[in-house]
Image: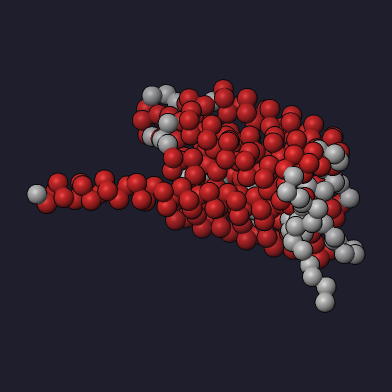
Amino acid sequence: MVELSIFQGVSWNVVSDVQQLFSYPFMVNALEAGTIVAVMAGVTGWFMVLRRQTFAGHTLSVIAFPGAAAASLAGLPLAVGYFGFCGLGALALAGIAGSRRSLSGESAAIGSLQALALALGFLFVSLYQGILNGLDSLLFGTFLGITSDQVTVLLVVAAVTLVLVCVAGRPLFFASVDADVARAAGVPVQLLGFGFLLVLGLSVAETSQITGALLVFSLLVTPAATAHQLTARPGLGIALSVAIALAVTWLGLALAYFSIYPVGFYVTSLAFGIYVLVRLGRGILDRPRATARLAGATS
């Protein structure tokens, strides 16, 4: 009887295991790429959660799938498909958001766009002549095969994204908290919303190359949602979002290296586990306060 071990090559010597992670160029590239993506996702994800655009972000992550599949079908680098389709998806979402339709109509339109993206993705996969061995990596992520050139591209995109967010940070925060007051104060709310969707599209395209198209939320949403549970202060919240994204990315890459499961599974599970612990902790801490308020109201 053959026994399959989940973790292979790991020892009780933590220093030796860490040194092993840095002994292979592909793993160094993966750690560098993961760090870049985590920082960018932590920042843009915090604003995405603040602006209540998680559904739009999820739609962009679904759009990344047909983009990667189309690039594979055309024999192009996956990054071309990721960035191209996510950019077009961001333009479509901006058009939907600017059409001044009702909230339910906007959600329905975004959902329809998401369904179309999934259909196109499966069409491109079926048209691919032969077996698409990288399908799992397109959907659920991988750290194998990340090159130094890809790391450079990720660094450039992340730098541009972070610069844009920093430049528009204050008015974007104002428009996200209270769009009507910001508009009355002369803030270009619609232009900021359009620009942020484009930035979000770049972030999704970049994050998908690590987590896969279907698990992109693990870095864009969960760390940011956890940070929002911990503090309402923007600066501290963004820092916590980045710190959590970095922690789950590094640990997820390490666990995937020593095990048989993909990195997307570990990153997603770790991020969700931290979020659940924070929510439970908040519930325990807030219970005495709620009880005291109730007692004061009834006295």
| Location of residue 69 in the rendering, given as x and y in whole percent from the top left corner | 79, 55
Question: Is residue 251 found left or right of 275 in the rendered image?
Answer: right
Q: Residue, x 49% and y 53% (percent of image)?
A: 276
| Location of residue 209 in the rendering, given as x and y in whole percent from the top left corner | 74, 46
Q: Residue 127 occupies which quadrant of the picture?
A: bottom right
Query: How many marks on residues?
Result: 0
Is 77 located above or below residue 127 in the figure? above
Question: Is residue 48 found left or right of 19 in the rendered image?
Answer: left
Is 66 located above or below residue 36 in the figure? below
Which quadrant of the figure contains the N terminus? bottom right
Q: Residue, x 36% and y 50% (percent of image)?
A: 284
Q: Is residue 138 visible?
A: no
The furthest residue to the front: 12
| Location of residue 14 in the rendering, given as x and y in whole percent from the top left corner | 72, 43
Is residue 114 or residue 42 the one in the foreground? 42
| Location of residue 31 in the rendering, given as x and y in whole percent from the top left corner | 75, 39
Q: Which colour scheme is used?
A: secondary structure
